[in-house]
Amino acid sequence: MSVILVQGYHSLKGELEIQGSKNAVLPMMAAAILHKGTTVLHHVPRIQDVFCMMGILESLGCVCRLEGHTLSIDARELTCCRIPEEGGKAMRSSIILLGALLGRCNEAFAHYPGGCSIGSRPIDLHLRALKELGAVIEEDDGVLHAASTGLSGTVIHLSYPSVGATENILLAAAGANGTTVLHGAAREPEVEVLCRMLGAMGVRIRGMGTELLEIQGEKTLGGGVFEVPGDRIVTGTYAAAVMAAGGRALFRRSSPRHLGCVLSTMKSMGAAIRIDQDGVEVSMEGRTRPWAVETGPYPGFPTDLQSLLMVLFAVGEGGGYLKETVFEGRFATAKELHKMGAAIIIEGKEAFVTGGQLRGACVRSCDLRGGAALVVAGLAADGETRITDCHHIDRGYEDICKDLQSLGAVIRRET
């Protein structure tokens, strides 16, 4: 069992390069199978979800090679369209392979996806859209079978701007005949990255970065060399660490233009923010000011950083208010923060946090972002914090201990 130990009350200072984006690289890897050749991705994070996706692609017949932070995917010999149960249930993002496999092979088998326990996260929007594109989908004992004699472009209306559903539609429509018009698309930066990658592969896409996308399918797609952007959620995590512990840090490759709502919120809470070409500098003196935040789809405040904000409220001068509108299970971390002395009242989708002091305790990582939030809480707590079940954190952070150590944190991992 992996355990992270954090000693509180050590301010942070220094400079750090942000890893490649988890939420961008996984759909980019899925898009690689649309090309019957080799695709190369640079700035790939060495995280568990990437390794899991590599395993799934290899089970389908691809040859994957990760050298440093460069990943090559050779999909010429893709011979299987069945996503293995173990890989599919380990990672929710595996579901976006449904669209890619339908676009490439006109058939796909998949189990209902797994991942973090942060809510129900149904995939009905994904399946409904794929059916509208012409797929016939059947379920037998938890296994989904999607098949088509050839997908055809159509008009799709999403009732909610789901990132995963938007990515599945893009991947399927890229290999469909004709034009697909998608209303209500997610506008997250990672969706735009996928659009640009598909565009470079030969798919004509209009409306990138907007809620209205027009995708002209192309049966023969080229490969290419692509760069994974910096992870905006990792940037937000380490910015929150500076705010919790105090100090000053510069984060390179941090995609600042995609952090507008996050940085403005942090500034309102007392942080000093400075932005240059591709870096963000965050500095903090004293405790955070009270604030109220509601999560929402981009460009709103990201749900992935909600538990980090809860920590900042818990150690702040006047607490704060949170409303979670995306995933109902995001408040699970509050129970662990209670063990550290946090005063948090949960009422449905709302959390009322009273500011105060935290103390070190033994807590458990319930999910990826909640685990990172507990690490940040440990930085601001009196004494030592022991965080168990840290495998969740490894799904999205290349080496959270090494990164924070480079900024002066007293943190280590034990097995």
Image: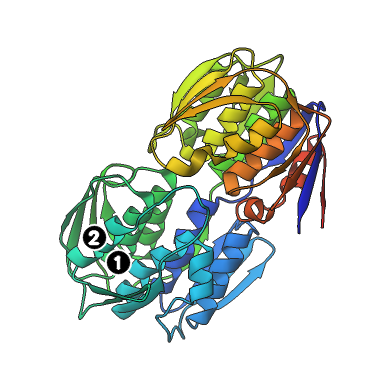
Q: Residue at x 43, y 41 (%)?
A: 328
Please tell me the numbered disc located at residue 172.
Answer: 1
Q: Position of residue 116 (x, y in %)?
A: 53, 53
Q: Residue at x 28, y 45 (%)?
A: 160
Q: CA distance from mark 1 to mark 2?
A: 10 Å
Question: Is 48 on the left-hand or right-hand side of 388?
Answer: left
Instruction: Identify the secondary structure beneath mark 2.
Output: helix
Instruction: Indicate the quadrant where residue 34 lies.
Output: bottom left
Q: Are marks 1 and 2 in contact (CB under 8 Å)?
A: yes
Considering only vertical position in the picture, is 61 above or below 370? below
Q: Position of residue 351 (x, y in %)?
A: 49, 27
The residue mark sitting in front, 1 or 2, is: 2
The residue pinned by badge 2 equals 129
Question: Is 294 on the left-hand or right-hand side of 266?
Answer: left
Instruction: Indicate the quadrant where residue 107 lies.
Output: bottom left
- Would you call the spot at circle 2 few (<14 residues within 10 Å), some (14-19), or many (20 or more)? many
Considering only vertical position in the picture, is 367 above or below 250? below
Of the residues under marks 1 and 2, which one precedes in the sequence? 2
Question: Is 151 on the left-hand or right-hand side of 340?
Answer: left
Please identify the quadrant where the N terminus is shown: bottom right
Considering only vertical position in the picture, is 244 above or below 197? above
Q: Residue at x 33, y 45 (%)?
A: 186
Instruction: Identify the secondary structure beneath mark 1.
Output: helix
Q: Residue at x 24, y 45 (%)?
A: 184
Q: Amino acid at mark 2?
A: Ala
Question: Is 159 on the left-hand or right-hand side of 265?
Answer: left
Q: Position of residue 260 (x, y in %)?
A: 47, 29
Q: Amino acid at mark 1?
A: Ala
Considering only vertical position in the picture, is 154 above or below 231? below
